[in-house]
Image: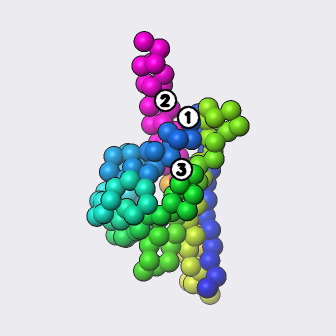
Amino acid sequence: MATYRIAESARIAAPAAECYAILADYRVGHPSVLPAPYFDGLDVEEGGVGAGTVIRFRMRMLGTTRTARARVTEPAPGRVLMETIPESNIVTTFTVVPDAGGAGCEVTIATEFPDRGGLLGAIERALVGRSLPRVYRKELALLAARAERRGAAAHAGADR
């Protein structure tokens, strides 16, 4: 089956481990970086941190709210976190790559969708392709703010 991919990346001035820890924590960290009004809740059904976690979330896009259930895996623990929605074959990947010095990192959020093809598929690709990058930019900004705040608090505590 053909697929299409939508992705956004940002450099974050916080250690990769800090960013990854926030994303992998589905009870506190990850929900705190989901931008409103696009996301309306995230519930943990199993686990809660990293691989083996099962989540249910509500996302508003294109005038519709959809509920989805995803299973989390870690193909590269500490670097790649993957959410798979089995019934729709949609996969969202969070990739965290540390800078050479380790003080910052690049985080990429990418979603791969099955391509329906035809006119409906073309319309869907166009609409999602315009909307989802905006959501990801907001999510990456929230992640940066949270990770940088936590990093600054950790440094302040270490300076005492």
> Which quadrant is the N terminus positioned in?
bottom right
The reply to whether the magenta stretch includes residue 159 is yes
Q: Which residue is mark 2?
A: 151
Label number found at residue 14? 1
Q: Nearer the viewer, residue 100 or 60?
A: 100
Please provide percent x and percent y for residue 50: 43, 56
Contact check, label 3 and label 2, Cβ < 8 Å: no
Crowd class of label 3 (few under 14; some 14 to 19; many from 20; radius 10 Å): some
Q: Is residue 133 above or below residue 98?
A: below
Q: Which residues are magenta?
A: 136-160
Which residue corresponds to mark 3? 78
Q: Which residue lies at the image location 41% right of the left edge and 68% below the top edge?
A: 71
Q: Magenta stretch: dominant SS?
A: helix
Establish if 129 lies above or below 30: below
Mark earlier in primary sequence (1, 2) = 1
Residue occupying the point 71% across, 37% down: 100
Disc 3 residue type (three-letter): Gly
Q: Give the left or right position of residue 2, taking residue 35 as reference.
A: right
Which image quarter is the C terminus in?
Answer: top left
Residue at the extreme right: 100
Pick the residue in front: 41 or 133.
Answer: 41
Q: CA distance from mark 3 to mark 2?
A: 17 Å
Q: Is residue 67 above or below residue 28?
A: below
In the image: residue 79, left or right of residue 158: right
Dot label at residue 34: none
For label 2, the crowd category at 10 Å Cα-Cα, with few meaning under 14, some 14 to 19 and many 20 or more, is: some
